[in-house]
Amino acid sequence: MSSKVYEIWRRNVLVWFALLILLTLTFGIAHLPLGVGNLVAGLVIATIKAGLVVMIFMGLRSADTLIKLAAAAGIFWLIFMFALTLSDVLARLADK
Amino acid sequence: MSTADRVLQEPWHELSRQREGATFGIWVFLASEALFFGSLLLVYAIDRISYPQAFITAGRDTDIWYGTINTAVLMTSSLTMAVAAQAAEADMRRLAIWCLAATGALAMIFLVLKGFEYAEDLRKNLWPGAHFALKAPGAQLFFALYWTLTGIHAVHLTIGLGLIGRLIAMGAWRRIQLRENPQVEVTALYWHLVDVIWIILYPLIYLMGRS
């Protein structure tokens, strides 16, 4: 029983460590003068962190195909919403 | 009574089908939540494209320490929630309930810190309106989004806290069995999404204009 407890903690604590290291990293990078690179670094690290939580803590990595499709549909429609709206907004800005 | 008798609910005939249905249902809900927060982030993107400098200078007026500590607190609560869900699956009832309690406690720490942060923001006149502290055009837009995004996130977090409290109460008094119970997984998945949303908000709100 106790080795099972150890096993559960071990695999989850590893992910938690990775999350804390990434948090420290993004906090540090934000203080470097990188211009637009600050925003890019912040978003890239946030995406990696979110990916760790979704894939491992939420178990999407080993989920059924149906579940993966449901999650992919959310991302898919998000991309559509951003792409279509921003294509309009950016075109208007460029037109000014 | 077998597990199926205790956990199975109408209209399901089999526990495995009930679990599949619950997991699929919550993922569809979470995808819709991603679109809900996504639309607010889209507004953020458009406002930021329109006022790039104002977003950077206004972002500097948020409190990076509250934001960073709260990020660590929420990520830790995701750890305890993941352990709780896996412990429930492995029929380690005590560990599951203790980890749920730890998750709830961390959620309360988050809300208390957020409360202190809001109080400080209000002292600094960062609520958009006539007495708003910053003069740059677009700064009010940043703070309107700050209050909206963090406020709606806090509402989600409070709902999650309620769901966790319910599981602890029902689990601790043995009115429900936690093992193989889809309610544990649904609560855990919802909780992780609240964490994911905060992870995305963190660089957009707190890490602006720090260099």
Image (spheres, coloured by chain):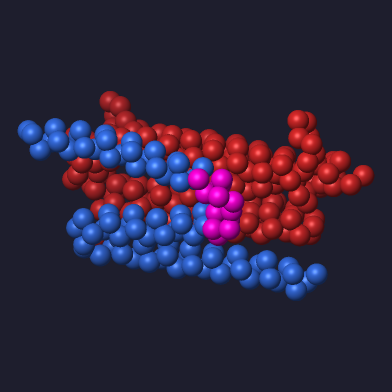
Chain colours: A blue, B red
Residue A20 drawn in magenta: no
Quarter occupied by residue A6: bottom right
Q: Position of residue A38 (x, y in %)?
A: 26, 58
Quadrant of the frame with the C terminus of chain B: bottom left
Q: Nearer the viewer, residue A51 or B167?
A: A51
Question: Is B8 placed above or below A6 here?
Answer: above
Which residue in the rendered view is the most extreme toward the right? B1
Viewer-closest of B170 and B135: B170
Residue B108 can be seen, yes or no: no
From this view, report whether residue B193 is shown above or below residue B9.
below
**Residue at image point 46% right, 57% down:** A51
Relative to B49, does residue A88 appear above or below in the rendering?
above
What segment is highlighted magenta in the picture? A56-69
In the rendered image, residue B102, in percent from the top left (x then y), is placed at: 67, 54
State the residue in front, B92 or B149: B92
Tell me the quarter of the image containing the N terminus of chain B. Answer: top right
